[in-house]
Amino acid sequence: MNKCDICGNEHSESTKSCAPCQKIISKHDKKLTTSKLRDALSAACDKEKSKGDERYFKCFYTGITSKFNPTPKAGLDPLKDALVLTIDHENPEDPDSRLVVSLNLINQMKNNFPKDKFKEIIITLGKYFNKEIEQEDFENEFKQLFGSA
């Protein structure tokens, strides 16, 4: 028996990964570097919940545990498929940045922003939504984030 390099479960496959993990890798390795993909999956795997043929992973940004889309369908809906996991570069502007597992909703939201800028935007919006900041201060902070204060 072999141990899966992603989830650690024993398997009899001739691959590094068990069949459920290999299915995820095969679905994404055409667009992404396989070694980076394996690293991202291994780092995110929720080994306690991953039993049998079910594989669960934690979102890098939220820590929420979920699963990847089990169907071959592409083009996830941002709302209907919000809690489905995706894989993308930590910094979408840098194709050499490491890969991370994230919820589809988070990935859609951060897709065009570097990680630090994305976090600043979310924190600023959160302060405003929680009424921790007045409209004028929010507007100034938000404009500063985008360089137009």
Image (tube, rainbow, N blue to C red):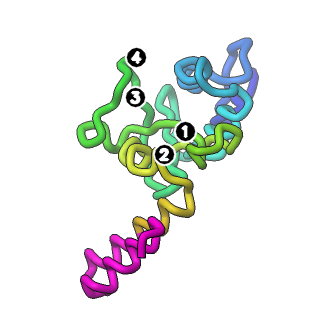
Highlighted magenta segment, given as a residue range: 123-149
Q: Which mark is residue 102?
A: 2
| Residue that appears at 47% across and 37% down | 86
Q: Which mark is residue 69?
A: 3
Quadrant of the image occupied by residue 11: top right
| Residue that appears at 27% across and 87% down | 134
Mark-to-mark CA distance, 3 and 1:
15 Å
Residue 13 lies, in percent from the top left, at 68, 14
Of marks 2 and 3, the one in the foreground: 2
Q: Which comes before the other along the chain, label 2 or label 3?
A: 3
**Image marks 2 and 1: residues in contact by CB distance under 8 Å:** yes
Say which amino acid is labelled 3: Asn
Residue 108 located left or right of residue 29: left
Q: Which comes before the other along the chain, label 1 or label 4?
A: 4
Say which amino acid is labelled 1: Asp
Q: Is residue 86 above or below residue 123?
A: above
Residue 9 lies, in percent from the top left, at 65, 32
